[in-house]
Amino acid sequence: FQHPVRMCLPVPTYPDEADLIARARSGDLAAFNVLVERYQGAVYNLCLRMLGSAPAAEDGAQEAFISAFRSLGRFRDGAFRSWLFRIAANACYDELRRRRSRPAISLERGGGEDGERQVDVASPAPGPDEQLETAELGLVLQGAISSLPPDQRLAVILRDVQGLEYAEVAAVTDISLGTVKSRLNR
């Protein structure tokens, strides 16, 4: 699937989404593909911000969509986007746990001078100066997001990058509204 690296605006719920979900539940792969197309950018960006690399984000997004397809029977007519983000977040948490148990260093791409991982963030800015400035800002922001503990990182990504409301973040993360606000404040 395609994976744009950009800020995602909230994806509205379309009137036919319930129909697509019902058709996908009955095994209609074309209907599920429409849902994938609708949410792939947002899911990929969530995974990219949680995992910090494009290949890991692609794998995480793919795992999330496979898991969502297999679990459609357990989806209970709520906010599909929130449910899908929860699955993607769990896929990211699983990958982060795997990394902790098997740390790896890339032979192709070394870290910076102080050992920090470098992250490429594409910029649509027209001028070279603006592109450089935007890329530098993107690196700084991604570095800051990556340095957060996973639970705080997820809250920041869902609220500030994906644009979810506090209540939606609480639903995705399965924590109270007060805890969401506390994590974002920290």
Image (spheres, rainbow, N blue to C red):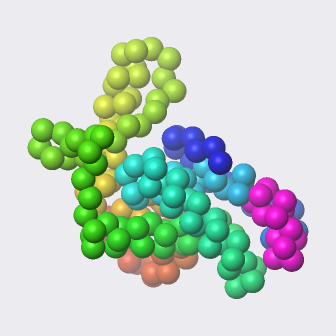
Residue closer to the observer: 50 or 158:
50
Report whether residue 176 is seen.
yes
Q: Residue at the spot x=57%, y=41% of the render?
A: 4
Residue closer to the observer: 38 or 171:
38
Task: List x then y, in percent, for residue 16.
Answer: 87, 62
Q: Quadrant of the C terminus?
A: bottom left
Report whether residue 79 is seen.
no
Task: List x then y, in percent, for residue 138.
Answer: 36, 38
19 over 176 or under it: above or below:
above
Q: Which residues are magenta?
A: 22-35
Residue found at the very far front of the displayed protein? 107
Q: How many marks?
A: 0
Image check: 124 left or right of 148? right
What is the chief secondary structure element of the magenta stretch? Answer: helix
Residue closer to the observer: 141 or 47:
47
Determine the image quadrant of residue 26.
bottom right
Q: Residue at the spot x=54%, y=72% of the render?
A: 86
Q: Residue at the spot x=59%, y=60% of the render?
A: 62
Magenta run includes residue 39: no
Q: Residue at the spot x=51%, y=61% of the render?
A: 60
29 over 163 or under it: above or below:
below
Task: List x then y, in percent, for residue 12.
Answer: 71, 56
Magenta run includes residue 27: yes
Determine the image quadrant of residue 50.
bottom left
100 over 56 or under it: above or below:
below
